[in-house]
């Protein structure tokens, strides 16, 4: 995979560069993460990283939409992640103007209720992650903690009746999962702890009564529920009961051989997302709860009709972290785990 796909992706990135968007899932913000990681030992990759990140920072503006997949929230997350993990820099400084815009949008959105429910959840996910990764300035931290609390209450006060209905087909970027994950993260940061425990107590029955029909969706929910049980030991028994029921009713065979189709190889709705969830569970538990077969993953990716058409074209969802660049990172990570 290294000898063929890695060189191929670099070539395709340069050939299509002017057509690639700036977002995190399909575009240059996601590619910046890829080349920041790959560039740690490779000068050419470092140059590609600088090219991508400079373009993202230059072209981002007040007109960029507020969204996670294709907008400002995802771009800021990518910059925050890079600065916290790979490059020296202060995200308080780099993201100052963008964070001001995001905070204004949060305040206006809550005051006027002009945003849809998914946008509020994505904002909470960004704020909770940003507080964990990058906010160091004390004044700014107080402001964003206040924003996170307002978002939690705003979202919780108007949960749709069908909020916990599963996505069909499988989708890893499901608003209930983002919401629960954000609550867990805020609790770990000692933000609004007692209220979050109370909210999760009340949501326990909803989660328990909404066991998904698709095994891939069960796997995604299992990861979040088990994470909640581990991080918040004070949660009631229904959360632990839900984790137990899910763990006993997930068939990887059904996921890999029945639910995930030949062309479904990417993260948001396919094979890579399933493997990421299995690896995340293993990391959460501290041991190999799921056996992750990198060779099977490799074969499924390379045998996919989507991959076989690469020489002709790369579809929109093939670019960026959701696509082949993210797939390559995941494969390299699996190789490292096996030594």
Image: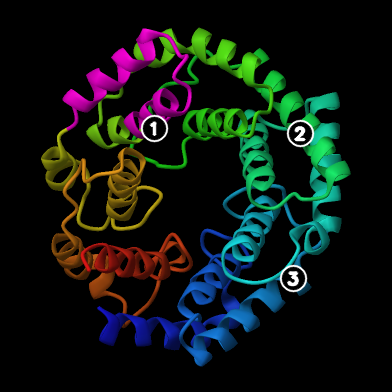
**SS under mark 3:** helix
Q: Nearer the viewer, mark 3 or mark 1?
A: 3
Q: Is residue 106 visible?
A: yes
**Where residue 298 sits in the image (x, y, percent)?**
20, 67
**Where residue 241 sits in the image (x, y, percent)?**
29, 13
Tell me what residue is drawn at x 47 percent, y 14 percent.
234
Disc 1 crowd rating (10 Å Cα; few below 14, some 14-19, many 20+) is some
- Quarter of the figure that contains the N terminus: bottom left
Viewer-side residue, 74 vs 127: 127
**In the rendered structure, does residue 295 fall within the stretch colored magenta?**
no
Viewer-side residue, 294 vs 186: 186
**In the rendered structure, does residue 235 fall within the stretch colored magenta?**
yes
Q: Nearer the viewer, mark 3 or mark 2?
A: 2
Q: Which label number is shown at residue 145?
A: 2
**Where residue 21 sits in the image (x, y, percent)?**
60, 68
User: What coloring was used for the rendering?
Assistant: rainbow
Q: Is residue 158 visible?
A: no
Q: Which residues are magenta?
A: 221-250
Give whichever of discs 3 and 2 has the lower sequence position.
3
**SS under mark 2:** helix
């Amino acid at each position: 995979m290294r000898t063929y796909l890695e060189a191929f992706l670099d070539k395709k990135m340069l050939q299509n560069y002017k057509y690639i968007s700036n977002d995190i899932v399909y575009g240059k913000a996601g590619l910046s993460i890829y080349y920041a990681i790959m560039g740690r030992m490779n000068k050419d990759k470092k140059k590609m990283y600088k090219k991508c990140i400079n373009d993202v920072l230059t072209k981002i503006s007040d007109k960029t939409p507020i969204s996670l997949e294709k907008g400002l929230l995802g771009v800021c997350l990518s910059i925050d992640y890079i600065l916290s993990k790979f490059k020296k820099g202060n995200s308080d400084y780099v993201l100052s103007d963008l964070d001001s815009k995001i905070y204004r949008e949060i305040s206006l959105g809550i005051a006027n209720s002009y945003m849809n429910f998914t946008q509020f959840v994505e904002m909470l996910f960004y704020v909770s992650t940003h507080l964990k990764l990058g906010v160091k300035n004390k004044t700014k931290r107080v402001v964003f903690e206040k924003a996170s609390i307002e978002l939690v209450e705003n979202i919780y006060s108007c949960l749709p009746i069908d909020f916990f209905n599963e996505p069909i087909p499988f989708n890893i970027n499901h608003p209930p999962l983002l919401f629960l994950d954000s609550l867990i993260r805020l609790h770990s940061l000692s933000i609004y702890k007692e209220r979050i425990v109370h909210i999760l107590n009340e949501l326990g029955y909803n989660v328990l009564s909404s066991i998904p029909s698709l095994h891939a969706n069960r796997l995604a929910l299992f990861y979040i529920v088990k994470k909640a049980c581990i991080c918040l030991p004070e949660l009631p028994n229904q959360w632990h009961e839900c984790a137990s029921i899910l763990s006993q009713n997930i068939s990887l065979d059904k996921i890999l051989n029945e639910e995930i189709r030949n062309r479904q190889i990417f993260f948001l709705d396919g094979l890579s997302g399933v493997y990421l969830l299995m690896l995340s569970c293993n990391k959460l538990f501290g041991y190999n709860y799921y056996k992750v077969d990198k060779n099977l993953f490799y074969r499924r990716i390379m045998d996919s009709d989507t991959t076989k058409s690469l020489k002709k074209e790369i579809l929109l969802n093939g670019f960026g972290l959701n696509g082949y660049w993210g797939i390559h990172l995941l494969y390299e990570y699996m190789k490292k785990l096996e030594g």
